[in-house]
Image (tube, rainbow, N blue to C red):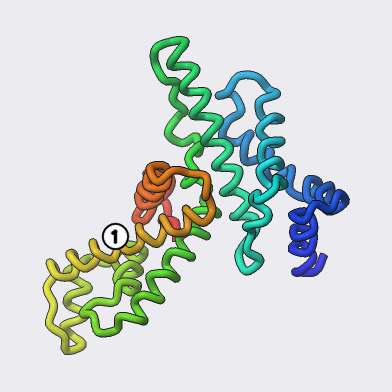
Amino acid sequence: MTPDQPWRMIAAAAAGDPEARAAFVEAFQPTIRAALERDLKGHLGQPDVIDDLVQEVFVECFKQGGALQRADPTRDFKSFLLGIVANIRRRAWEVHTRRRLEQEGEPHELPDDSGVSVTLDRRYAKELFRAALEHVKQRAVSARGRSFNAHDLLIRRYRDDEAPRAIAASIRSDGGECTAKQVSDAAGKAKDEFRDALETELRARHPDCSAEEISRMGAELLTLIAKGRSGVDSPPVW
């Protein structure tokens, strides 16, 4: 299959072509099922729940004005698809939690490492991070008069874990005047810019989510800016 063939299939499936839709299901059903089973199997009870959720993902993809019609061929489709899966999975878990609360009086929580949150799909998170960083980079280019480049600060402070004191010393060695506190304050502002960019990307991928849901997902993503999944000592999602 040549690089443009998957997108030809996706475009045809979005337009309603029966053969393209059958090919789409065959191509992506294993990915969708694996993501759902990894996070929900054993937690939602009935085995047929996964089957129903797989079908929900395809309904979301194929419906009029659905996800496939919003897919961007300049971006990685698998990460886009995982975002759809994560949205369906999150809604299913919220319904399940409400039912448990009504029946037992207490919400039933997944283990911290379950990955139910959209942010724990690392490939999807990486795609969001790249897109958000590009937003910040473009803003930095258009605001060259600022004392600090927000994009560079994000990379040095959060990706490379460089201390504010070290960044300030580096700036001074290049002839600038800077303190660690100024770096720390500027890094905080850069992080706010990054959060806004993340929320912009999330709104584009999850147009049905409320502002509150987008804000929550953005906040969860920010917890990955300087640590690995669920706090495990592993590289941050960059």
**Which part of the image, by quadrant, shows the N terminus?**
bottom right
- The quarter of the displayed image where residue 15 is located: bottom right
Q: Residue at x 56, y 30 (%)?
A: 92
Q: Observer-nearest residue: 184 or 230? A: 184
With 43 as the anchor, is 6 left or right in this view? Answer: right
Name, please, the residue furthest toward the top.
104
Q: Residue at x 62, y 36 (%)?
A: 36
* Residue 172 point in image, percent of width and height: 16, 83
In the rendered view, tell whether residue 38 sits above or below residue 120. above
Name, please, the residue furthest toward the bottom.
175
Q: Observer-nearest residue: 186 or 160? A: 186
**Which part of the image, by quadrant, shows the C terminus?**
bottom left
Name, please, the residue furthest toward the front.
64
* Residue 135 point in image, percent of width and height: 42, 69
With 160 as the anchor, is 94 left or right in this view? Answer: right
Q: Crowding near pointer 1: few (<14 within 10 Å), some, many (20+)?
A: some
Q: Observer-nearest residue: 197 or 82? A: 197
- The quarter of the displayed image where residue 231 is located: top left
User: How many marks can you see?
Assistant: 1
Q: Residue at x 69, y 45 (%)?
A: 31
SS category of the residue bearing label 1: helix
Can you identify the residue that label 1 sits on? 192
* Residue 24 point in image, percent of width and height: 78, 50
Q: Amino acid at mark 1?
A: Asp
Q: Residue at x 28, y 66 (%)?
A: 190
* Residue 207 point in image, percent of width and height: 52, 50
Question: Taking the image as drawn, is residue 232 in sight?
Answer: no
With 16 as the anchor, is 83 left or right in this view? Answer: left
